[in-house]
Image (cartoon, grey):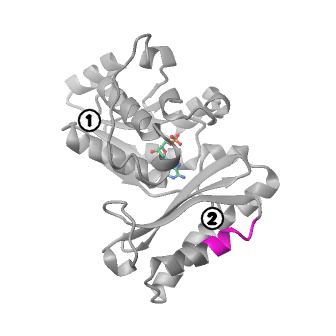
C-alpha cells in the first residue's frame, strides 16, 4: 500500500482516501465518488477494526462480502482497495493508542468505552500507511468525524478532512451496514428515528427553543415503537458537540441519537438549526 502511495505521490498526483469497514452501501459509494473530486487517485480501505468494538458488541458478526465490495468499489472509481488483516494492523505486542480525550467521552463514547480510542488509533495508522492528501468521512458518524478532525488538528497531520452528507433509504433511515441485521418489523419501525429527528427540526422552525421540550416530543415519537429503545438523545452545539438547553445557545445545532432496535444499535443525527 505504501509503495503504491509513494509512486502516486512521485508523479505529483493527489490521493483521496475513504476508510471503511466494508459491506458497502450507497453511503460508501457517495464517499468514493466524492473522493474522485478531491484526488487524482482514490484509495478505499476495508478493515473491521477490533479495537473499536466493545466485548459484547458485534465484532464477530459484522457483515462481510469482499467480492461484492470489490465490484462496487471498482464501479465507484476506486483505484486501490486496501484490505489489511488484523495481524498486519495489530501485530503481537502492539501497545500504542491515540486518545482524543474529551470528545471521546461524551455521547456514544459514554456507552462505548474505548470505541473512539480504537477509531482514532486505526485512522492514524491508516493515514500513516496510505499517506493521503485528503480523507473523506460521513456525517452519519458525526462524533467520529469530530474526533478525527480534532486528532488531525492536534497531531498536525497533513491530511485534509472532508465531510459528506448522510445518505438515506427512501423512508429516511440512514444507510448503515448494520441495517442488514434488522428483521422486517424492526426495519419498518426504524423509520421512526429519522421521523423523530425531522420532528425536532420542524419544532425549531416553529419557534420552540427549549431543548428539553423538543427532546421530549422526539422521544415520544420514536417510542411509538415498542421495539426501539433510545440509548441517548441529545441536542448539541454542532461545533463542539456539547449539550445546549436552548436552541439560542448555539449558531448551529444538531440532534444526535443512538437507538437499539432489538439487539441492533443504530445512530443518526440531523442539523436542526444552521448547518
Ligand atoms: P463504516 O464502513 O460504517 O465504518 O463507514 C465508513 C465511512 O462511511 C464513514 O466515514 C461513515 O461515516 C461513512 N458512512 C456510513 N454510512 C453513511 C451514510 N449513510 N451516508 C454517508 N456516509 C456514511
Of residues 65 and 94, which is closer to you in this image? 94
Q: Is residue 196 above or below residue 173?
A: below
- Quarter occupied by residue 134: top left
User: Can residue 242 be seen?
Assistant: yes
Q: Which residue is mark 1?
A: 14
Residue 52 at x, y percent in the picture: 49, 34
Of residues 247 and 45, which is closer to you in this image? 247
User: What is the magenta range?
Assistant: 219-225
The quadrant of the image that shows the N terminus is top left
Q: Earlier in the sequence, mark 1 or mark 2?
A: 1
Q: Which residue is mark 2?
A: 193
Residue 22 at x, y percent in the picture: 56, 35
Residue occupying the point 74% across, 56% down = 187
> Quick check: is 220 in the magenta stretch?
yes
- Quarter occupied by residue 91: top left
Residue occupying the point 42% across, 52% down = 106
Amino acid at each position: 500500500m505504501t509503495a503504491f502511495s509513494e509512486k502516486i505521490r512521485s508523479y505529483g498526483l493527489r490521493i483521496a482516501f475513504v476508510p471503511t469497514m466494508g459491506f458497502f452501501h450507497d453511503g460508501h459509494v457517495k464517499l468514493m465518488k466524492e473522493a474522485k473530486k478531491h484526488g487524482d487517485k482514490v484509495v478505499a480501505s476495508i478493515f473491521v477494526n477490533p479495537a473499536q468494538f466493545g466485548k459484547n458488541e458485534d465484532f464477530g458478526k459484522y457483515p462481510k462480502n469482499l467480492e461484492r465490495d470489490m465490484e462496487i468499489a471498482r464501479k465507484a472509481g476506486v483505484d486501490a482497495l486496501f484490505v489489511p488483516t488484523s495481524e498486519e494492523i495489530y501485530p503481537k505486542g502492539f501497545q500504542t493508542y491515540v486518545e482524543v480525550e474529551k470528545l471521546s467521552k461524551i455521547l456514544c463514547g459514554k456507552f462505548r468505552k474505548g470505541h473512539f480510542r480504537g477509531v482514532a488509533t486505526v485512522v492514524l495508522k491508516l493515514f500513516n500507511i496510505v499517506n493521503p492528501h485528503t480523507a473523506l468521512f460521513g456525517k452519519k458518524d458525526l462524533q467520529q468525524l469530530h474526533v478525527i478532525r480534532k486528532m488531525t488538528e492536534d497531531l498536525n497531520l497533513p491530511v485534509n478532512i472532508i465531510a459528506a452528507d448522510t445518505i438515506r433509504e427512501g423512508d429516511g433511515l440512514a444507510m448503515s451496514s448494520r441495517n442488514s441485521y434488522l428483521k422486517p418489523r424492526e426495519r419498518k419501525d426504524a423509520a421512526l428515528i429519522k421521523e423523530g429527528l425531522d420532528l425536532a427540526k420542524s419544532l425549531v422552525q416553529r419557534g420552540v427553543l427549549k431543548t428539553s421540550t423538543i427532546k421530549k416530543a422526539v422521544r415520544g415519537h420514536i417510542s411509538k415503537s415498542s421495539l426501539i429503545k433510545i440509548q441517548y438523545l441529545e441536542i448539541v452545539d454542532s461545533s463542539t458537540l456539547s449539550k445546549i438547553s436552548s436552541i439560542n445557545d448555539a449558531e448551529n445545532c444538531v440532534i444526535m441519537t443512538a437507538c437499539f432496535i432489538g439487539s441492533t444499535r443504530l445512530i443518526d443525527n440531523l442539523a436542526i438549526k444552521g448547518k
